[in-house]
Image (cartoon, rainbow, N blue to C red):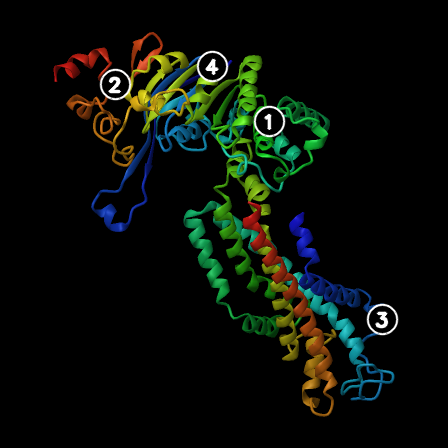
Amino acid sequence: MSNMTLDNLSKKYVLKAGFFTQLSGRAGVVSAVDQVSFQMEEGEIIGLVGESGCGKTTLGKMLLKIEDITSGSACIDGLDISSVRGRKQTVEFRKKVQMIFQDPYDSLDPKMTIREIVAEPLKALKLCRSGAELQERVSRTLSLVELTPVELYQDRYPHQLSGGQRQRVAIARALVVEPEFIIADEPVSMLDVSLRAGILNLLQRMNREKGIGVLLITHDLATARFLCNRIIVMYLGKFVEITDPTSLVEDALHPYTQLLISSAPDLFTDTSNRIKVEGEAASAVAPPKGCRFSPRCPYAKDVCREKVPELTEYEPRHFVACHKVSKDFSNLYNME
Amino acid sequence: MKKLKSFLTNPQTVTGLVILVIMLGLAALAPVICPGNPLFSVGKPLQAPGGDFIMGTDYLGRDVWAMLVWGSRISIIFAFGASLLSLIVGIVLGALSGYIGGWFDDLMCRIFELFYIIPRTFLVILMVAFFGSSVGLMVIIIGITIWPSNAKIMRAQVLTLKSRGYVQAGNVAGGTKLGILFKHIVPNGMGPVLSNSILQMAQAVLTEASLSFLGLGDPNRASWGLILNAGQKHINSAPWLVIYPGIALALLLLAFNLIGTALHKTLNVKQAAME
């Protein structure tokens, strides 16, 4: 049905610099996503977790061809994304891969009715032969996301709906073409907590009933735990840990993941033994040599500042990129 | 819809619309109100207002009221013709310039500036001298000299709107670049361009009147500028020749300015509150 393979995928932005900076050869390059690799299995819901600016959204946009890929490759269903060229292939690609945008107050055109918004992909991709078929699919999808009765909602404008209803419209727009793979960029972060569960359950149902693969981009561990089969933890453009939700919470290996879990607000945890962290995330313009987390890592040793840790399978299906836990480097690490 | 209601119930808009509707009525019903050619002599020259001629006659014995009524047609044609042309050219070029960006944007901006600096009256005089004074030609000339401001406004609108979420969503939905530009970006950026266009209508009317006043208008058609032109030599003995067309001109310009400013205010103040 749907799978995704990332192979050394990278995105670099060249900073626009003034004339003299360019002369001195110090024009900055932001490496937003740095050589990430991952193999997603069919029908999985994958969570991509990390702090703001770590490159999660950039990664999602590359998978949608909104951003160009700098190097490496990404395949969805065996189709290399960078080979998609021209109108015909783009149309085929858009039928397969859709996106749910983060901000429902920004992603719906204020001048269009709900019906027009949901029908837009069907029209653009020429998926319906008649007006009746179009209306039928729009109605079906709107009732799927529980915007019922459909007649009541379909002729309204986005500003007449609440945030949760708007986000349902955004989801309906992604689902209406019956894609095989959905990238959901923070689908619930703009919503009230009371509405989140409804949207997440909807995504889960789509995944179970239709086998739609989902890449859930979020900064919220709780959301990812609730929904995902596997979670990728990203830090400053690198994948630092990949595992299933249970082992992520109970058995996190990477110091950054431990920090994330420890800092999640929770009523019942004793706050005194939280992991404290110094400093800010390093800049992606000049990332630290070696492990990108080393400047803030409480366990960092010389080897961490010199050598980039590889993502290795520490336990079955539990990948981590850290010298402290990696078998290959544990000797080096322990020697010091 | 709330915006539209507050715009339409605004006293400025109401005053402007009432004047405009009266003018449009006069222009549409000219053959009914004043049958016959308004440029034919129908009475004694320089007759004062009152009696048979409510606005008097000019030095050739032509009825000023009839010329005024028929002249409103010319003013309306210029107002809507020139601003429509300016609207279309301005929107298309401005939108493409902002959307494509890069060297194309640089080039287009220089072209906008080139059209900005053309002295409009001078160009029209030149064209009239070459091609004669036909209404169509003059509408086109005024239209192509006022579009750059529309283009600049549209370009600025596109620059702010093209990074909006619904534009990216349109891309993911499978829209083509041009489709996204004219379906999502242009309709959402139209407001300020429209209010500018209404102000441009006033500009077009004034340009036409000044050309006719200078004797560069079409001499075979009654226009307000033509009456003013005929009246300038007799301004001491027959002041009605300049007073009535002057009032008509001022009222029409006032109407356009009221509507244009009201629209501008509605869009600016409420936009921030809406979003």
| Amino acid at circle 3 | Ile
Pointers 4 and 2 within a single chain: yes
Badge 3 marks a residue whose secondary structure is helix
Check disc 1 and report the residue beneath it.
A172
Real-space CA distance between mark 2 and mark 1, rounded to the nearest whole angstrom = 40 Å
How many numbered marks, from 0 up? 4
Question: Residue B14: image x %, image y %?
Answer: 71, 62
Percent position (x, y) of residue B270? Answer: 58, 51
Farthest-out residue, top: A316
Rendered position, B256 above or below B99: below
For mark 2, what is the residue? Answer: A322
Task: Tell me which corner region of the image, top left, top right, bottom left or bottom right, holds residue A304.
Answer: top left
The residue where tag 3 is placed is B33
**Mark 3 or mark 4, which is nearer to you?**
4
Tag shown at residue A21? none
Residue at mark 2 to residue at mark 3: CA–CA distance: 91 Å
Q: Which three-letter amino acid code belongs to the residue tagged 1? A: Ala
The residue mark sitting in front, 2 or 3, is 2
Q: Kindly tell me whether residue A8 is visible in this rendering.
A: no
Q: Residues within 10 Å of mark 1 (few under 14, many from 20)?
A: many
